[in-house]
Structure formats: structure tokens, C-alpha cells
Image: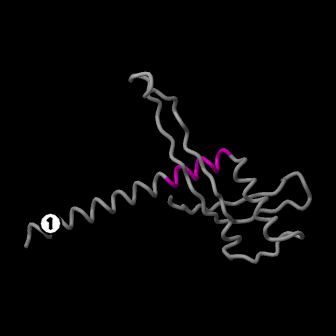
Amino acid sequence: MSRYRYATTLASNPDRADYAEVDVEVTYEVSFGRPATLYAAPERCHEAEPDEVHSIRLEKVGGRPAPWNLHFHSDKHFAAICVEKLEESEADLAAMIENAHESELALEDEIADMRWEARREGFAA
């Protein structure tokens, strides 16, 4: 399964005096869903399954890899907080899924171009 990259800005609670924003970069995996099948034999019918983001891992904070030393407990605790914020954000999850779809389409285009070039070279020989 492919891992994808996503960069965003996370904000702490804006109502607090210690409000801060931090730029993060994460890697993650996506389980692509499937559309519903309603018109088939009963054993082949199924409901739609949505795309799901999982295995989110914090890679960089402010453009730097670990150690970040931004939380008084540990970097692991800070990473868990960031991942939790991303998992709770519908907008970030939707953007991550969109990013994964675009990456897959770009890869398919690249493979198609390579096959086309191989065919052209075969005909030219």
C-alpha cells in the first residue's frame, strides 16, 4: 500500500493565551472505498464503502524532522496530539483523500506514457 504526503498548518486552541500555529508534514495510507452495487445477484450486492485515511505519521514540524522538542512530555506525545487533530478534521481528511487520488492518477498517467513510448520505440525499430 502506498504512503502519501500531506502538509498543513495546525492551530492550537485560538481562545487560549498560548495560541500557536505550526506547519506539519505527515505521511499516511488510504484504503480506497468502492461504490455501491445495487443491481446484481443478491450475493454480489453491497453498500458503498467510503475512502478511509489511516496510519497517519508525523514526519516534519516547521520543515524539520524529529526531534522537535515542542512539548514538555515528549516528541511522541506531540506527534499523537497532531495526528489526533488531523483525524478530527473533516477538511484535512478530505484533502488527504483528494491528494491520494491525484497521486494515483498521476502515477497511472506516467505508466501510460511509459507504455506508449515503449510501443513507439518498438514500431520505429
- Looking at the image, which is closer to me, 9 or 58? 58
Residue under numbered circle 1: 120
Would you identify the image quadrant in which residue 108 lies?
A: bottom left
Q: Disc 1 residue type?
A: Arg
Left or right position of 112 against 56: left
Which part of the image, by quadrant, shows the C terminus? Answer: bottom left
Residue for point 55% across, 52% down = 30
Based on the picture, tell me whether residue 43 belongs to the magenta stretch: no
Question: What's the colour scheme?
Answer: one colour
Would you identify the image quadrant in which residue 8 lies?
A: bottom right
Left or right position of 64 against 18: left
> As drawn, which residue projects farthest toward the right?
17
Q: Is mark 1 on a helix, strand or loop?
A: helix
Mark 1 residue crowding within 10 angstroms, few (<14) / some (14–19) / many (20+): few
Q: Position of residue 19 (x, y in %)?
A: 85, 59
- Looking at the image, which is closer to me, 50 or 5? 50
The residues colored magenta run 90-100
Residue for point 47% across, 30% down = 36
Based on the picture, tell me whether residue 96 belongs to the magenta stretch: yes
Would you identify the image quadrant in which residue 67 lies?
A: bottom right
Q: Main secondary structure of the magenta part?
A: helix
Q: Position of residue 73 (x, y in %)?
A: 88, 69
Does 59 appear above or below 67?
Answer: above
